Image: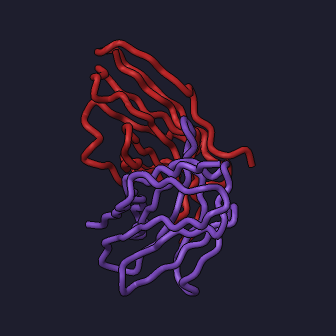
Amino acid sequence: DTGVSQNPRHKITKRGQNVTFRCDPISEHNRLYWYRQTLGQGPEFLTYFQNEAQLEKSRLLSDRFSAERPKGSFSTLEIQRTEQGDSAMYLCASSPRGGGNEQYFGPGTRLTVT
Amino acid sequence: AQSVTQPDIHITVSEGASLELRCNYSYGATPYLFWYVQSPGQGLQLLLKYFSGDTLVQGIKGFEAEFKRSQSSFNLRKPSVHWSDAAEYFCAVGTYTGTASKLTFGTGTRLQVTL
């Protein structure tokens, strides 16, 4: 068990560019989540996958955001036409099959849009 | 909708002193409750969780939390703080509807430990 991994750890991009982040969950976990955290705030839920199915999307997830989990393993989060307001830490978490809601977080990807 | 309030933005304690971080939640059903810790530039580490049963739960690093339904609270405690405990602490409430699952976090409490 190597934990949840995220790549890249840091991304600096210019406004208007597209960016893609990757998350590799803990191997036996079937649930995967994306959150966004801005400075001085707690993480905010973006979206949730159970296996390859995206079951819930937050209203925070505008049309410029898309997430996939094509084979029920790793996931990608893409932001198109980035804006300065997208600057944040993007956190991925996974949780195991079964009732409990405990989620295990990766180290995050810090996005800076200039 | 569920919500979490952490009334203390910043707390400073001396090393060796006791600690209590406050958390109040709002949720219509029996909540799943969590405390996470975040060191600078890092992701969140789960300290402890409450699902049901004994209202006093033990976690890692010597932390414990007590669920009080009547007060809608889930305060985090530690009897003796170490300098390495300096970090940001987040309380969260989890909702699970069978098809969707997410955590709602408070805004966090930053703990500073003086030597």
Quadrant of the rendered structure where residue B101 is?
bottom left
Residue at left 55%, top 56%? B13
Residue at left 38%, top 53%? B9
Q: Which chain is red?
A: A
Name of the residue lying farthest toward the right? A1
User: Looking at the picture, how far across and down is residue A99, in whole percent?
Assistant: 54, 72
Q: Is residue A30 visible?
A: no
Q: Quick check: A95 above or below A52?
A: below
User: Looking at the picture, how far across and down is residue B31, in whole percent?
Assistant: 42, 75
Residues A74 and B8: in front is: B8
Image position of B107 (left or right of B19): left
Residues B101 and B74: in front is: B74
Residue at left 56%, top 69%? B77
User: Looking at the picture, how far across and down is residue B29, in whole percent?
Assistant: 35, 80
Residue at left 41%, top 48%? A43
Image position of B79 (left or right of A56): right
Residues A102 and A77: in front is: A102
Q: Which chain is purple?
A: B
Name of the residue lying farthest toward the top? A14
Residues B58 and A63: in front is: B58
User: Looking at the picture, how far across and down is residue A80, in whole percent?
Assistant: 32, 23
Q: How is the image coloured?
A: by chain
Q: Quick check: B30 above or below A78?
A: below
Name the quarter where the C terminus of chain A is drawn. top left
